[in-house]
Image (spheres, rainbow, N blue to C red):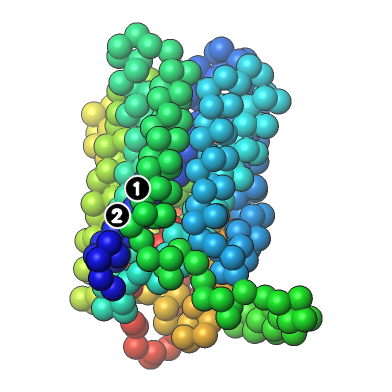
Amino acid sequence: MSGRFASTSTRVVALVGGSHFVHHTYFMLLPPIFLPLRTDLGLTDPQLGLALGTLGLVVTALQLPYGHLSDTYSRTLVLAMSFVFGATGAVLTAIAWDFQSLVFAQVILGIGIAGHHPAHYPLISAATTAATRGRAYSVHGFTGTLGLATPPATVALFATMGLDWRLAIWAIAIVGAVYGAACLLAFRWFVDPGVTRPPTRDRPARAELSPRRQRLLAGLRSLVSARPILVLTVLWFASSMAAWGVRQYTGTLLTDGYGVGAAAANLSVSAMLVIGAVLIFAGGWLTDRHSPGPVLLGGYAALVLVAGVLALSTIPTIVAIALVLVLGATVDGSRPARAALADRFSSSDSVGKNFGLLTIGVSGGSAVAPPLLGMVVDGWGIGWAFAAIAGFGVLAGLLTVVVLSLAGGRASPSATVAD
């Protein structure tokens, strides 16, 4: 590549990293405003859980359709749809006036969020080499986690200035819309079209639809027959349940369980997520230096211990805040190890299909955890919700043992960071 397309790899990784940041801020809009949604809109915990579950369900359902568009037509078309629907959903969240309007906003937001991974991964893959792809995905994972940390900090900042939560959500929507427009223009002007569009030969002609359908069915059958990938998908589902529970309900735990003010609780959640983002790199280093198994088992053991202690709601507040700061790292630090296990069970012609299935496991966890934990909070209290999160950690640890037994003595390839 030459001329204006020089340094395409760096540009694509930077643009995709910014997109990951924006879309993950959209993913984390509701948890920091649980309290005002309860007071201003009169919503209950089960209703809030249902709204979050709706978001996760839409994201899960649209993974494969968006993936088809990205693989056969245009990656930036999918990215454009994500930016437009994402910003629109964020605005609708800011102006929601009742439960029905909030759920509708989450549907639109989910249509936007769902497209970012199906666009991101092919863009990074097309712009990088095998020697640099792992680092590119590390940047991708890091920026995504920073995005999750941004809404709690933004809501807390606006609250300290005496500004309404709706203005905080408006600010996030405006920043996302502006970045989206700049990102799409940068892809159009400064990135090789060979990166943003799949090769022409990959686009289906009408006469090829039937054979392609047959290949799709054959691929699905191969997935069903791959026991390690199926178990790993359930493992990613359990990990996602725990991660979303931690992200969504840690602020509520601090306010309701330990009497921490809403602004301080949101800042603590943001700090927790930033620490988790940094420790993604530590998890990748440990996975490369040792193996995925000890990293995963150590992470889940720490999750069970920390979540279980926090669930008691009896420890000193300062100790609870200290434990919260390391809580996110118990899940995020093991993400490279989970990706390494996925690589271990994937051949060169099955990576895409396997990642698609694993992503559905992640999105499925984000759809199930919010309404389930919302009912637990409503019926038994926030402490029991964290006991349930510890239970998800136990399940994930047991599934890790099963996956490792299926792995046998296979050598582990280098890890990449995935959501």
Question: Which secondary structure, mark 1?
Answer: helix
Q: Residues within 10 Å of mark 1 (few under 14, many from 20)?
A: many
Question: Mark 2 is on which residue type?
Answer: Ala
Question: Which secondary structure, mark 2?
Answer: helix
Residue 312 seen: no
Residue 175 at x, y percent in the picture: 38, 32
Q: Quadrant of the C terminus?
A: bottom left
Q: Residue 8 versus residue 21: which sits nearer the camera?
A: 8
Q: Quadrant of residue 408?
A: bottom left
Which residue is at 65% across, 60% downward? Answer: 65
Return the residue at label 1: 18
- Specify the label residue 340 is tagged with: none
Residue 33 at x, y percent in the picture: 47, 24
Residue 308 at x, y percent in the picture: 40, 45
The furthest residue to the top: 162
Return the residue at label 2: 14
Which residue is at 51% across, 61% downward? Answer: 75
The furthest residue to the bottom: 409
Is there CB contact under 8 Å for labels 1 and 2? yes
In the image, taking residue 163 as reference, residue 214 lies left or right, namely: right
Which residue is at 66% across, 54% downward? Answer: 61
